[in-house]
């Protein structure tokens, strides 16, 4: 059996909405709390423009819902209701007889708040604290007159939640010199939403075939994404000079994090990269030469200082005052 719900005016259009009998409509415009929440969801059929907003995981965000045509409201005459559009999850609400959190979903208790003072001025915005990945939803703000359920305001806000991925870390194993398969592993953690990962041949900036890759993306205990990708390059003469990069794309943040790994002159051992022994020997030789030159330079400086000190001491004589020269008498006879 179908029964007609109360008439709701929306966006200047008038139409009657039919719902199933289990939505109990009580006379006089007064609704029991559970029925009110269902009716506000079911009887509002008009579409509203969806606004976009972004927030980082762990931050606080405000979802705007304000009436710009009126500056004062009596909260005893209003129903204010915030819900998640897809699941009809109750985020928070205000009732004329006093708001409670009895019907608020557990994940939004103590996180979603309305300001009574601001609502009196027509600002019904939602303050959402400590944003989580699960908050990446469409939120709907509904404001009604309590007497006849005429619509005062409706806003829909799509919240995009994001978290920065860590800088990709590339490790390599295998040796193109010994005709082994070369394997690169790229890892990045704690990002949101699900990333796109690309391996790039830096020789010509082309994307490396997905058939050579094995990507694993999973949610960790924080509800964030970790990604691990393995790239296997079969042995070939050109593989000794391969130069690749791993790029992690976050589509919400319009962000690309890239790390570079070069196989030339490198051999690998499990998860760490070790330089070629020949190159290590060359570097040790250069260090030894630098040390010898530094010692010789130090000896030259010490010698110059010693010589200067000696000359300074030799050139300094004591002053004993004016001297009297006695002359012998001269016989003029």
Image: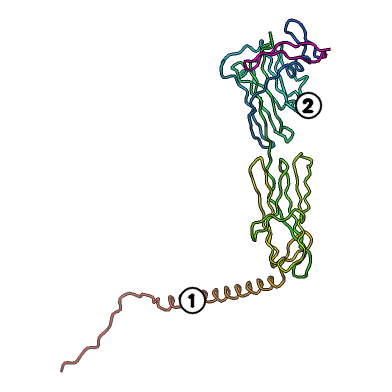
x, y percent for residue 150: 66, 12
Name the residue at 57% across, 75% down: 293
- Tell me if mark 2 has few (under 14), some (14-19) or many (20+) residues whose alpha carbon lies within 10 angstroms of its own: few
Q: Quadrant of residue 238?
A: bottom right
x, y percent for residue 236: 74, 67
Q: Quadrant of the N terminus?
A: top right
Q: Secondary structure at mark 1?
A: helix
Check the image and report above or below for 294 versus 5: below
Magenta residues span 1-22
Q: CA distance from mark 2 to mark 1?
A: 81 Å
- Tell me if mark 1 has few (under 14), some (14-19) or many (20+) residues whose alpha carbon lies within 10 angstroms of its own: few
- Give the residue at mark 1: 304
Q: Disc 2 vs disc 1: which is toward the camera? A: 2
- Magenta: main secondary structure: loop
Q: Quadrant of residue 180?
A: bottom right
> Residue pushed farthest top?
28
x, y percent for residue 42: 75, 18
Check the image and report above or below for 173 versus 306: above
Q: Quadrant of the C terminus?
A: bottom left
Check the image and report above or below for 109 versus 332: above
> Residue 106 shows which numbered tag?
2
Q: Is residue 19 magenta?
A: yes
Name the residue at 68% across, 71% down: 279
């Amino acid at each position: 059996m179908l029964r007609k719900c109360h008439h709701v005016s929306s966006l200047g259009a008038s139409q009657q909405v039919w719902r199933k009998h289990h939505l109990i409509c009580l006379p006089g415009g007064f609704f029991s709390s559970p029925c009110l929440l269902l009716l506000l969801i079911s009887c509002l059929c008009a579409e509203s423009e969806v606004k976009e907003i972004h927030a980082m995981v762990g931050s606080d965000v405000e979802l705007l819902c304000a009436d710009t045509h009126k500056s004062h409201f009596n909260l005893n005459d209003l129903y204010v209701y915030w819900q998640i559009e897809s699941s009809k999850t109750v985020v928070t609400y205000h009732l004329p007889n006093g708001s409670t959190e009895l019907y608020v979903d557990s994940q939004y208790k103590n996180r979603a708040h309305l300001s009574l003072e601001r609502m009196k001025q027509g600002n019904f915005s939602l303050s959402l604290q400590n944003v989580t990945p699960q908050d990446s939803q469409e939120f709907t703000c509904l404001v009604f007159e309590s007497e006849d359920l005429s619509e005062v305001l409706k806003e829909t806000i799509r919240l995009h939640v994001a978290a920065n991925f860590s800088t990709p870390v590339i490790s390599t194993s295998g040796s193109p010199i010994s005709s082994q398969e070369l394997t690169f592993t790229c890892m990045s953690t704690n990002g949101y939403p699900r990333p796109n990962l690309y391996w790039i041949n830096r020789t010509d900036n082309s994307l490396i075939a997905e058939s050579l890759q094995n990507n694993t993306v999973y949610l960790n205990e924080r509800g964030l994404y970790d990604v691990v990708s393995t790239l296997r390059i079969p042995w070939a003469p050109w593989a000794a000079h391969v130069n690749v990069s791993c790029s992690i794309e976050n589509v919400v943040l319009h962000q690309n994090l890239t790390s570079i790994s070069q196989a030339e002159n490198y051999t690998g051992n499990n998860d760490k990269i070790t330089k070629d022994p020949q190159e290590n020997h060359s570097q040790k030789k250069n260090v030894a030469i630098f040390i010898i030159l530094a010692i010789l330079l130090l000896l030259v400086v010490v010698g110059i200082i010693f010589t200067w000190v000696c000359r300074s001491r030799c050139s300094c004589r004591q002053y004993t005052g004016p001297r009297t020269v006695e002359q012998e008498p001269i016989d003029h006879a």
